[in-house]
Amino acid sequence: MVAGAPYLEPGRIGSLTLKNRLVRASTSETMAAPDGAGTPALANLYGTLAAGGAGLLLTGHIYVEPRGQASADQPGLYDDGLVESMVQVTDAVHAHGGRILAEIGHAGSQTMLPEVGPIAPSPTANEMYGLQPREATPDDITDVIAAFGQAARRAKQAGFDGVHIHGGNGYLISEFSSPITNVRTDAWGGDAERRGRFVLAVYDAVRGAVGDDFCVTARIGIGDSIPGGLEPAESVERVRALAERGLDAVEVSYGIMRSYLENIRTYVAVGAAQAARNGLVQRLVKPEGPEAYYRHFARAVKEVVDIPVILVGGIRTTQTMADVIRSGDADFLAMSRPFIREPDLPNKLAAGRTGTVECVSCNMCLVHDGFDPLRCWRTSPAAVAAHVYTHHIRSRLPGRWGRGS
Ligand SMILES: Cc1cc2nc3c(=O)[nH]c(=O)nc-3n(C[C@H](O)[C@H](O)[C@H](O)COP(=O)(O)O)c2cc1C
């Protein structure tokens, strides 16, 4: 054990004992087959991450029904026929002694694929895509809740160690939770209690499908980034209700946002020297982003519930990792972009490395989401050139040479 590194100590989430507090945060992969089936590429990604030493892996979001698909080549668990294809993913993780939870979600109105026919609590145009959803009928709502339960059952059958319900970042569950996107006046909206029914019903369906011993966690949008949106006090109360029902851990994030950049912030903890080493001239005209930007949400939840709290969002230095764990503000530390750049980051930290991670939060990975398989595009000049070609040039080419071909 490295002295002074509490993030390397084992921890527990529900029935799972995890070898350290380092969690690979959900990160969409764009590696599934067109119908959402698991692929060797997906299995290879998670096998590599498991070999890299993280205590827990959370998959990118997996859609629970076809109209909840967010982007192309996203994995799905909307049909029993997809279960077998996911076994290669969980096998690859378990072969390295890793643990993996399937993040199950529904995009609501926040989809890159308008052709899926998106539904949302109210017909409010999506803040990010401007997409006009159809208002979900009470039957639609019952169907989606059941689909979450069925997807959780399939995740368990496929060998996942648990499920992580995606209740944040502007997708369907956060749309039900927010007064901006839920202006219904029936049983599913109108006041805080009714806005909260959807996430509780999803949790109940999931728990009912997988049983008490299976690990069930959730990412919850604790507040919206938009004035007049969801207030943390309302959301923390909802987390308390979920914890009382048996939720095993909560990861804190934003709910409704105007841009992904509010959640996936640029140049976090990137000082001038690291910017210069990476040729990151853009950073010099933009300020360095603050670390651990949802720590206040984690603290607010910790004051009210005693289930483990997972902090995500801009965790970049071993000093901050140690400080967050020691302070008790959170129990686990989830990172997304640092693991794209360094899948073996936990092994490096276990070998004694300290300081700042290599990722410079440039967000080149993000602009390829839904178009190209997940990777870091800043690892070499050739990788940057591939990014420029793929993102800026190929997207302007017509027909089968163009993006998405
Ligand atoms: C390329 C990319 C894909 C992402 N996909 C998901 C996802 O599928 N589900 C999710 O809950 N968050 C997703 N996120 C958000 C991350 O989990 C995380 O909240 C965010 O990147 C901030 O953490 P970081 O600073 O460690 O990157 C994604 C982020 C990136 C960069």
Image (cartoon, rainbow, N blue to C red):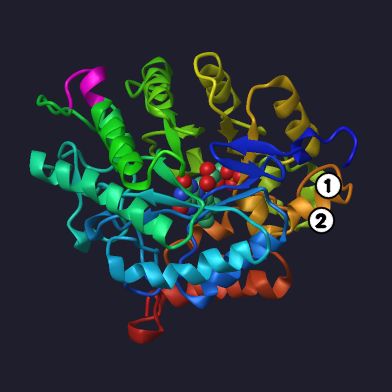
Q: How many marks?
A: 2
- Asked where in the image residue 10 lies, by quadrant, the reply is top right
In magenta segment, residue 194: yes
Residue range in magenta is 189-195
Q: Please, what secondary structure does the residue beneath circle 1 have?
A: helix
Disc 1 to disc 2, how far (Cα)?
A: 6 Å
Contact, mark 1 vs mark 2 (Cβ under 8 Å)? yes
- Please give the name of the residue rendered at 71% of the width and 41% of the height, measured from the top-left corner: 316
Q: Secondary structure at mark 2?
A: helix
323 or 15: nearer the viewer: 15
On the image, numbered disc 1 is attached to which residue? 273
Image vertical order of residue 28 relative to residue 125, above or below: below
| Image x and y of residue 281, in percent | 70, 53
Mark 2 crowd level (few <14, some 14–19, many ≥20, 10 Å Cα): few
At which x and y percent is residue 291?
67, 34
| Residue 36 visible to an observer of this rendering | no
Q: Please state the horizontal and vertical placement of residue 280, each as a whole percent of the image.
A: 71, 54
Residue type at numbered disc 1: Ala
Q: Is residue 138 left or right of residue 361?
A: left
What label sits on residue 277 in the rendered view?
2
Residue 56, compared with residue 237, is above or below; it is: below
Q: Residues within 10 Å of mark 1 (few under 14, many from 20)?
A: few
Amino acid carrying label 2: it is: Arg
